[in-house]
Image (cartoon, rainbow, N blue to C red):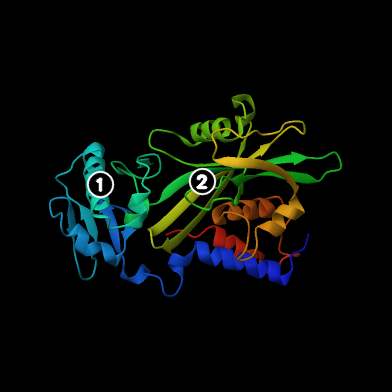
Amino acid sequence: MAGSRSWAEGVLQLLGKMNSFHMQGSSKALCKPFVVEGTEVGMVQPRMFALLGRYPKLFQVSDGAGGRVEISSQLHSYQQRSAAIEQVLREWRQEKLFDSLSKWRNEKFSFDSLFLPPPNIAVTLPGLFGVKSYGVHVNGFVRHGHGEMSMWVGRRTESKETYPGRLDNLVAGGLSAGLGVKETLIKECEEEACIPKSIATTAKPAGTISYTYEDEWGVFPECQFIYDLELPAEFVPEVGDGEVQEFYLWPLEKVKEAISGSDSEFKPNCAMVVLDFLIRRGILHADNERCYHQFIEGLHREL
């Protein structure tokens, strides 16, 4: 399964897009750290500075060397900080300041002591503050008697707000406030693909991927916890909550080809999860892919 030059170039293009915040022309050099009680939790773009200056009791925006955006020390608790930021976002939505706010689903993503030193915050739209978000992605695969593997992929519904109709991993979901990683995995398996808990709990942790991209919605440092779930040959996932419209069981060669190129059918971060699977399973390695080391670097870029 050696990769062609054009296939590899397409994958590098994907990785560059998903790490655009690190690329020339991004706003990275102009951003300020977003700090909560001495802990840097995000990056704020220049377009936000004047807006945040409207709330001097909530945000302190400092200039010069060591400039930062810091939440007021008068807000002592996780709940106070989270509520204050949510109120600001509601005001901005009423003013129609950001397109992303019109699609706000009121879902809170937690940035608490699970991954950062406490105390911290919960943010509903992390991109506006460049706060890292976390998710869980599951590679569902089947081993065949002759030693080859196939992978289950899902097609997102056309009603999805992001990447409608694109291919996805078998199961994927963001970590919401109050749920742990394995809890989220089991929940998403049941809801998205009707995978019972007895099977979902056999998923094996397989590391993480990290990347940071920038678009009109903000800065997005993301970390995805990856699990591999070997499914019985006779098991067929079923459409659950409507996030996915259909599931396919594809040979790995077909999945591999589908993750590359500007016209890739895959949601970009899901393509990265597949790429990571191919590397970890030894299907892509240094002797059959000249860009092997670049692939690994692109899958693990921290903010």
Is the C terminus in the top left, top right, bottom left or bottom right quadrant? bottom left
Residue beneath the point at 45% across and 67% down? 22
Residue bearing the label numbered 2: 159
Determine which quarter of the picture holds residue 9: bottom right
Is the N terminus in the top left, top right, bottom left or bottom right quadrant? bottom right
Establish if 97 lies above or below 135.
Answer: below
Residue farthest along the right direction in this orientation: 146
Q: Earlier in the sequence, mark 1 or mark 2?
A: 1
Q: Position of residue 212 (x, y in %)?
A: 45, 59
Which element type, helix, strand or loop, lies under badge 2?
Answer: loop
Q: Is residue 130 among the parts visible in the rendering?
A: no
Establish if 55 lies above or below 170.
Answer: below
Q: Amino acid at mark 1?
A: Arg
Residue beneath the point at 16% across and 47% down? 73
| Mark 2 crowdedness (10 Å alpha carbons): few <14, some 14-19, many ≥20 | few
Residue farthest along the front direction in this orientation: 159
Q: Amino acid at mark 2?
A: Ser
Q: Position of residue 110 (x, y in %)?
A: 37, 41
Residue beneath the point at 77% across and 31% down? 234
**Badges 1 and 2: C-beta atoms under 8 Å apart?**
no
Residue farthest along the top direction in this orientation: 198
Please name whichever residue, 145 or 84, is drawn nearer the observer in this view of the structure.
84
Which element type, helix, strand or loop, lies under badge 1?
Answer: helix
- Cα separation between marks 1 and 2: 24 Å
Please name whichever residue, 10 or 297, is drawn nearer the observer in this view of the structure.
10
Report the disc number at residue 64. none
Residue bearing the label numbered 1: 90
| Mark 1 crowdedness (10 Å alpha carbons): few <14, some 14-19, many ≥20 | some
Q: Position of residue 51 (x, y in %)?
A: 21, 60
Please name whichever residue, 167 or 35, is drawn nearer the observer in this view of the structure.
167
Q: Position of residue 207 (x, y in %)?
A: 57, 46
Q: Is residue 244 among the parts visible in the rendering?
A: yes
